[in-house]
Amino acid sequence: MRRNDYGVCCPASLKIQKTGTCPATTENECGSMCTHDLECPSVQKCCHTEQCGSSCIHPKNVTGELIV
């Protein structure tokens, strides 16, 4: 991740996406609110669902430990 002289993250890094695909539905558990993948811990992605809005969710097609 690149940073400018002021220690603020560059806008170009906001286009970085983590691997995996957002699930079509969630199991009624909403993660923390987010606006992009880099705000989510571990392998979680920022996904939009009807019941949760945009929140950090463990993606499908990715192996890895889900840290809550």
Image (cartoon, grey):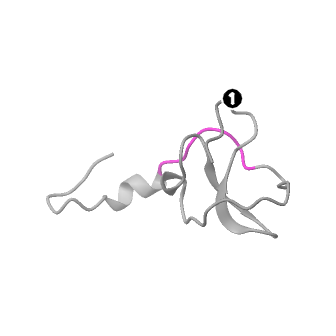
Quarter that holds the N terminus:
top left
Q: Secondary structure at mark 1?
A: loop
| Up-down relation of residue 49 to residue 37 (above or below) | below
Q: Main secondary structure of the magenta part?
A: loop
Q: Position of residue 13 (x, y in %)?
A: 39, 53
Crowding at dot 1, Cα within 10 Å, few <14 / some 14-19 / many 20+, comes out as few
| Up-down relation of residue 66 to residue 23 (above or below) | above
User: Is 18 covered by the magenta stretch?
Assistant: yes
User: Is 52 covered by the magenta stretch?
Assistant: no
Q: Position of residue 68 (x, y in %)?
A: 63, 48
> What number of labels is visible?
1
Q: Position of residue 26 (x, y in %)?
A: 82, 55
Q: Is residue 35 left or right of residue 55?
A: left
Q: Position of residue 31 (x, y in %)?
A: 67, 59
* Magenta-drawn segment: 16-22
Q: Residue furthest left?
A: 5
- Give the residue drawn at x 36%, y 61%: 11
Amino acid type indicated by mark 1: Thr
Which image quadrant for residue 21? top right
| Up-down relation of residue 31 to residue 23 (above or below) | below
Towards the viewer: 6 or 17: 6
